[in-house]
Amino acid sequence: MKGSLCHEYETDNENYIEEAKGVEGGFLDAGYLSYLVRIEIIPEGSDYDSSIIRSTIEYETDDKCQVNASLISTDLLATIADATTKYLKEQKNQMEELK
């Protein structure tokens, strides 16, 4: 896929939502009409001591264009979520050891 990815970002700090919309390059160069990644952090538990990371990818293609939808995957987002979870657990354990 040629071109670099350029995004417009929108952040909703109150609801813990981050959106990145592709505006040029990347998937748009490959024939997609639109491409949006949304990451939501959903607090869980009575003390909000845990959370769920929900990632969504929305895209639109032109019916005339033969675009391979399998290029779009949440695998990278899942890997990032796993790495974030591991890091936060390590930080929490270190803080508990200092108490």
Image: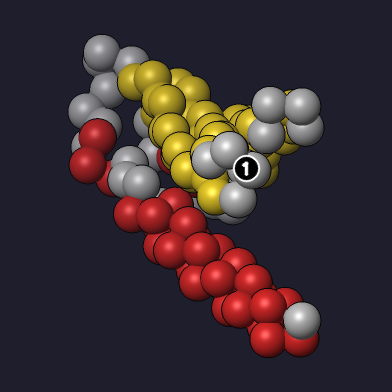
Residue at image coords 50%, 72%: 86
Q: Which of 4 and 48 is in front in this view?
A: 48
Q: Is 60 positioned to the left or the right of 11 in the image? A: left
Q: Is 58 positioned to the left or the right of 94 in the image? A: left
- Estimate how packed mark 1 is, as few (under 14), some (14 to 19) or many (20 or more) residues with alpha carbons within 10 Å: few
Confirm whether residue 81 shows in the render.
yes
Residue at image coords 64%, 43%: 47
Image location of residue 50, percent across then percent down: 54, 50
Residue at image coords 27%, 22%: 65
Instruction: Report the amino acid beneath label 1.
Output: Tyr
Image quarter of the C terminus: bottom right
Q: Is mark 1 on a helix, strand or loop?
A: loop
Give the vertical position of 89 relative to 31 (above or below). Answer: below
Residue 7, picture quadrant: top right
Residue 59, picture quadrant: top left
Image location of residue 11, percent across then percent down: 74, 31
Q: Nearer the viewer, residue 16 or 56?
A: 16
Give the vertical position of 43 relative to 59 (above or below). Answer: below
Confirm whether residue 29 shows in the render.
no
- The count of marks equals 1
Q: Mark 1 points at which residue?
A: 48
Image location of residue 20, percent across then percent down: 62, 36
Residue at image coords 39%, 39%: 30
Image location of residue 21, percent across then percent down: 60, 31
Q: Is 61 positioned to the left or the right of 19 in the image? A: left
